[in-house]
Amino acid sequence: MARRKPSGPRLSSKPQKGAARNPGTSGELRIIGGDWRSRKLRFPDAGGVRPTPARTRETLFNWLSFHLAGSDCLDLFSGSGALGLEALSRGAAHATLVDNNPALATALRNNLRFLGSQAGTVTCTNVDTYLSQRARQPFDIVFMDPPFRQGWLTTLLPLLDSHGWVKSGGWVYVEHESDLPTPAAPADWQLHRQKTAGQVTYCLYRVAQAAGRNE
């Protein structure tokens, strides 16, 4: 889904205030770790795509370093796929990338082909539509960087929980405006790490191991 929020720590389909681009221009993503380290990928300037600071991505993947190998990941509001592609580079078995912008979805598929990877699935649809009904096994890791000032987390965090999108013991990464309180998480999610960088606060939750959880 296209992102529209102020400067934030990842690549996404969101405009940056005061950073207009000429029509037809494109941006560049550099993978910072793993098998595709230093590989550079192009993506369209669809909705205002901007690079994420490498330091923020490195922090997140350091947090997840012992949980990525063989994992099944979901990258919501994927934009240029910075988190999903980085996860694949670092050993994830599969990543599902969801964005509602057709140009970005096409670029994601092209970049997966360029990398020679068949481990990514791109879905071009609204995130809330995608999450409304689960017809597959839950994910090990979910990345979620929604547009700011639209209340997405208030809606989607309960939806992820009620529809069982995350495995027991799995992880959920979210970003939100640093000038607003962190939205309430489901009762069985435990805040593992949290950090603020400029206008963005990012959080990593662990879904508690629970007997009888619907998988």
Image: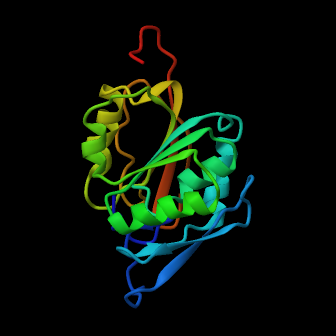
Q: Position of residue 122 (x, y in %)?
A: 43, 51
Q: Nearer the viewer, residue 143 or 187?
A: 143
**In the image, 27: left or right of 77?**
right
**In the image, 124: left or right of 150?**
right
Give the residue at the far top of this rendering. Answer: 212
Q: Nearer the viewer, residue 181 or 4?
A: 4
Quadrant where the image shows the C terminus: top left
Looking at the image, which residue is at 50% across and 52% down? 202
The part of the image, by quadrant, that contains residue 5 is bottom left
Looking at the image, which residue is at 35% across and 34% down? 160
Depicted 185 relative to depicted 38: above or below: above
Depicted 2 relative to depicted 165: above or below: below
Q: Position of residue 179 (x, y in %)?
A: 39, 61
Q: Position of residue 62 (x, y in %)?
A: 69, 47
Depicted 35 relative to depicted 52: above or below: above
Looking at the image, which residue is at 32% across and 47% down? 153
Quadrant where the image shows the N terminus: bottom left
Depicted 98 relative to depicted 10: above or below: above
Q: Position of residue 20 (x, y in %)?
A: 39, 87
The part of the image, by quadrant, that contains residue 101 is bottom left
Q: How many marks?
A: 0
Q: Is residue 80 visible?
A: no
Looking at the image, which residue is at 57% across and 75% down? 28
Q: Is residue 206 visible?
A: yes
**In the image, 106: left or right of 91?**
left
